[in-house]
Image (tube, rainbow, N blue to C red):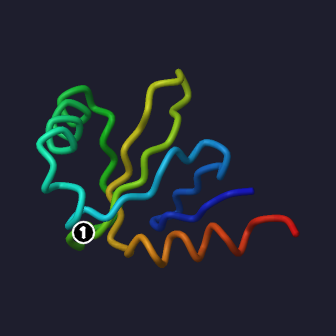
Amino acid sequence: MYLHLGQNIMVRTQDVIGIFDLDNTTWSFRTRRFLEQAEREGRVIPLGEDLPRSFVLADGEEGTPVVYLVPLSPAALSARGSRNLPI
């Protein structure tokens, strides 16, 4: 199954490592440092022009994690993901 992140970007649900709220997680120095390093390495993909509300960490093609900055809330992304789960 796939998780639609917006801007015609879809990620396989099995590749999703986590969905994180930017407001809550960026308080941590470690999270900020991780996001800054990912940006320097070119592994951050912003989706849309709006202010991002969450980020999705997913396995990339070479096994390197990719960070998607998403303007949707983590709750909306989780709901999208849970609708695609097989029963």
Residue 39 occupies quadrant: top left
Give the quadrant of the C terminus.
bottom right
Residue 66 in the image: state x and y as whole percent.
41, 38
Q: Does residue 63 sit above or below 28 in this rendering?
A: above
The residue pinned by badge 1 equals 49
Tell me the crowding category of disc 1: few under 14, some 14 to 19, or many 20 or more residues within 10 angstroms, Cα based. Answer: few
Q: Is residue 18 left or right of residue 47?
A: right
Residue 73, picture quadrant: bottom left
Q: Secondary structure at mark 1?
A: loop
The x and y percentages for residue 17 are: 51, 44
Q: Residue at x 67, y 70 (%)?
A: 82
Tell me the residue at 41%/70% (across/down). 74
| The N terminus sits in image quarter | bottom right
Note whether 46 is above or below 80 in the view shown.
above
Under mark 1, the amino acid is: Glu
Q: Residue furthest top?
A: 62
Number of dots carrying numbers:
1
**Residue in view at x 37 percent, y 59 percent:** 20
**Residue located 58% across and 76% down the image:** 79
Horizontal and vertical percent position of residue 71: 32, 71
